[in-house]
Image: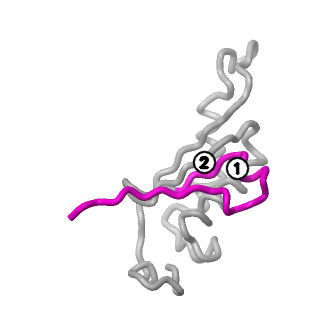
Amino acid sequence: MLPEHAGKCSRLHGHSYRFEVAIRGPVQTSGPARGMIVDFDEVERIVEESVLDELDHRHLNDHIEYPTVENIVLWIWQRLESRLAGLDEVVLWETATACAVLHRTDILSSSSDAMSSSSDAMSS
């Protein structure tokens, strides 16, 4: 719920979010994750513990101040960055046509203005 928003998002509502996590780094040459940057099972476990268990079936306003898709993707980044070495990008889809993308370079520049949002215009 976004109480200051002029549109329907000012009312209690829900979304079925989808998000993507991208990892950048060297391919491991030995060990159980040989041939991988990181084992996807490990990424999945970390994402579940750090993000999904915290937000699934919860009122986002209880966890994230002013939960726009941009603020949520930043919250996700902050939860994952210390646990996923090589975290390079998080994309959060609010709908099938609207998302926010946060790249490592956005964080390094320390400017939330660098984050990109996208929404495809739909004709009626």
Where 114 sits versus 42, above or below? below
Q: Could you tell me residue 122's position as x and y percent? A: 29, 60
Q: Nearer the viewer, mark 1 or mark 2?
A: 2
Q: Residue furthest left?
A: 124
Is 120 magenta? The answer is yes
Q: Quadrant of residue 98?
A: bottom left
Residue placed under numbered mark 2 in the picture: 90
Q: Could you tell me residue 93's position as x and y percent? A: 47, 54
**Residue range corresponding to the magenta coloring:** 100-124
Query: CA separation, marks 1 and 2?
Result: 10 Å
- Number of other residues with Cα within 10 Å of mark 2, as a class: few under 14, some 14 to 19, many 20 or more: many
Q: Amino acid at mark 2?
A: Val
Name the residue nearer the viewer: 83 or 86: 86
In the rendered view, does 87 fall on the left or right side of 47? right
**1 or 2: tag closer to the N-terminus:** 1
Name the residue nearer the viewer: 113 or 91: 113
- Picture residue at 53% right of the left edge, 74% below the top: 59
Residue placed under numbered mark 1 in the picture: 80
Q: Could you tell me residue 92's position as x and y percent? A: 52, 54
Q: Amino acid at mark 1?
A: Leu
Q: Could you tell me residue 88's position as x and y percent? A: 68, 41
- Picture residue at 74% right of the left edge, 60% below the top: 111
Q: Quadrant of residue 15?
A: bottom left
- Number of other residues with Cα within 10 Å of mark 1, as a class: few under 14, some 14 to 19, many 20 or more: many
- Picture residue at 70% right of the left edge, 18% below the top: 32
Where 109 sits versus 13, above or below? above
Where 46 sits versus 68, above or below? above
Residues under numbered marks 1 and 2 in contact, where contact means CB atoms less than 8 Å apart: yes
- Picture residue at 52% right of the left edge, 61% below the top: 56
